[in-house]
Image (cartoon, grey):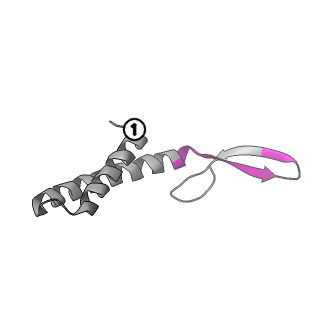
């Protein structure tokens, strides 16, 4: 599967084509469907990346520890 950047570029291309307004209704609907799929794929990639982000949490005065952030609940793991 394409990576996030490729999917985002493809989505931008779809949006540009739709914005031009030069397509038939059928072509526009097909591109819109493709755009929704690309948008969902990008969203899924972003959610997966957010799930891997580590948050630094201050403990005490000068001590720090690294914890994972649970994106769905916002809680620390």
Q: Would residue 12 appear left or right of 31 to someone viewing this image?
A: right
Residue beneath the point at 28% across and 53% down: 14
Q: Is 33 drawn above or below residue 6 in the view shown?
A: below
Return the x and y of residue 66 as percentages of the image width and height: 71, 43
Q: Is residue 27 magenta?
A: no
- Please tell me which residue lies in front, 23 or 6: 23
Q: Would residue 5 appear left or right of 34 to someone viewing this image?
A: right
- Please tell me which residue lies in front, 55 or 77: 55
Residue under numbered circle 1: 3
Residue beneath the point at 31% across and 50% down: 13
Residue beneath the point at 54% across and 59% down: 73
- Identify the residue at the far right of this view: 61
- Please tell me which residue lies in front, 7 or 75: 7
Return the x and y of residue 7 as percentages of the image width and height: 36, 44
In the figure, residue 18 lies in which quadrant? Answer: bottom left
Q: Is residue 56 magenta?
A: yes
Return the x and y of residue 46 as percentages of the image width and height: 46, 49
Return the x and y of residue 69 as percentages of the image width and height: 60, 51
Q: Would residue 59 appear left or right of 8 to someone viewing this image?
A: right
Which residue range is magenta in the image? 50-64
Q: Would residue 65 appear left or right of 76 to someone viewing this image?
A: right
């Amino acid at each position: 599967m394409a990576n996030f950047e490729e999917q985002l570029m493809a989505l931008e291309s779809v949006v540009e084509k739709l914005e031009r307004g030069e397509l038939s209704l059928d072509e526009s609907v097909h591109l819109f469907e493709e755009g929704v799929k690309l948008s969902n794929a990008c969203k899924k990639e972003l959610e997966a990346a957010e799930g891997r982000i580590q948050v630094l949490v201050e403990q005490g005065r000068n001590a720090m520890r690294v914890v994972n952030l649970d994106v769905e609940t916002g809680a620390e793991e």
